[in-house]
Image (cartoon, rainbow, N blue to C red):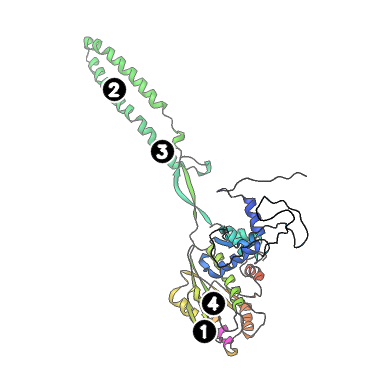
Amino acid sequence: MQHIIDRRLAGKNKSIGNRERFLRRYKDQVREAVQRAINGRSIRDIEKGEDITIPKRDLSEPVFGHGQGGIRDMVHPGNREYVRGDRIERPQGGGGQGGGGSQASDDGEGEDDFVFSLSKEEFMQVFFEDLALPNLVRTALAEVPEWKSQRAGYSSDGTPNNLHVVRSMRGALGRRIALGASSRNEIRELEERLAELHGAADGGDAALLRDHALEIEQIEARLHHLRGRMMGIPFLDPIDLRFRSRIKVPVPTTKAVMFCVMDVSGSMDEQRKELSKRFFILLYLFLTRHYDHIELVFIRHHTQAQEVTEDEFFHATETGGTVVSSALVLLDEVIQARYPTSEWNLYVAQASDGDNWHHDSSRCSQILEDKILPLVRYYAYVQVAQTEQNLWDEYLALAERHKHFAMRKVLDPAQIYPVFRELFKKEGVEA
């Protein structure tokens, strides 16, 4: 069997094969580092690379060593302490005196933890890994902006179907006028001189006619040459052709705002908040590929709702009971105050465990149907708990009446992307 080893370098002396083997070997450490980075990052910075640190103990190579006990014969260099037949006591601690103690030393060596940089693409690959993201969808999330063809004046080369006849003929006419201007002026002057000479000859003065015969002959020869030059100017030259030029420009996109609404009541533990954050991150990545300008609004609620920063949204410890309608009322107020639908595309993602005050769920349904759903482009509700309570029932009735209102359950990180794909699939495309 023949083995081919690819040792080609891939930029800055980094071997692609070695890099991939390293990532596979220390997959667990890389995944843990990405997880820590996600927890500490903002949604806007999720696409950046990351420097990860791997402890030196995880980089140790397997070695063979002698076990305890047994009799071995060894040859040592000469010394002044032992003679033939002496028994040498085995060193304590397995053969070394180091152990990472807290005492300083004037000798010995050590190693720092290994720091490894993940690129943006590698970071996103690890991030999507436990979301069960297929390769085809990774390409879809990294799509380029849409482009349109736009007229950009005229060029001297192009395809025949883009030929502009009027502009080409105008250029040809201008070229012929410019090239023949000096010749026409000279022809006009020579013709005037020739007419004077012929007028003098018609007066009957034979001596004057003989004196100007040579000049008349030269003028007629020059006129013949100039008229030949005029006839030699081509009617249409390749340099006269003008073609319609078109360039590709990015399609102007309108602005979008993404509202992140999350329940932070006592029943929403850290695991459920983590599921919510991952869904919000995926939605943000999706929207940034379709809009040049996107804003984020974070609303957290328990019995009361408030607009907060992203750090407070995910890490604040304030908690309480659950009144979901307070968040929807605040959401409507923010839309009316800052985001007119004539200028903004509105998207709402709500995450909750479904637990709500019983008499409040019907009010939530009414607020959504009367005030919010007529304004937003899409409303996605994600429940991070299995139990279906009265809020789920109210929302289920809304989903049957409004196509742009969707609701799903997410109980595990691996379910986030399939649910997201189902929520935001194109019409006629399988999820």
> Mark 4 belongs to which amino acid?
Val
Q: Where does the magenta region start and end?
A: 360-364
Mark 2 lies on a secondary structure that is: helix
Magenta stretch, main secondary structure, is helix
Label 1 Cα crowd, 10 Å radius (few <14 / some 14-19 / many 20+):
some
**Residue farthest toward the bottom in the current orientation of the protein:** 359
Q: Which residue is mark 4?
A: 261
Q: Which residue is mark 2?
A: 190
Q: Name the disc covering residue 171, or none.
A: 3
Front disc: 4 or 3: 4
Mark 4 lies on a secondary structure that is: strand
Nearer to us in this view, 355 or 118: 118
Mark 1 lies on a secondary structure that is: helix
Q: CA distance from mark 2 to mark 3?
A: 29 Å
Q: CA distance from mark 4 to mark 3?
A: 64 Å
Quadrant in the picture for residue 368: bottom right
Of the two numbered discs 1 and 4 on the same chain, state the one appearing first in sequence.
4
Q: Which residue is mark 1?
A: 326
Front disc: 1 or 2: 1
Q: Position of residue 239 (x, y in %)?
A: 44, 35
Tell me the quadrant of the picture where the N terminus can be found.
Answer: top right
> Mark 1 belongs to which amino acid?
Ser
Of the two numbered discs 2 and 3 on the same chain, state the one appearing first in sequence.
3
Of the two numbered discs 1 and 2 on the same chain, state the one appearing first in sequence.
2
Res 374 seen here: no
Evaluate if marks 4 and 3 touch, with contact meaning CB atoms under 8 Å apart: no
Q: Position of residue 254 (x, y in %)?
A: 48, 64
Q: CA distance from mark 4 to mark 2?
A: 91 Å
In the image, residue 313 sits, relative to residue 115, either above or below, namely: below
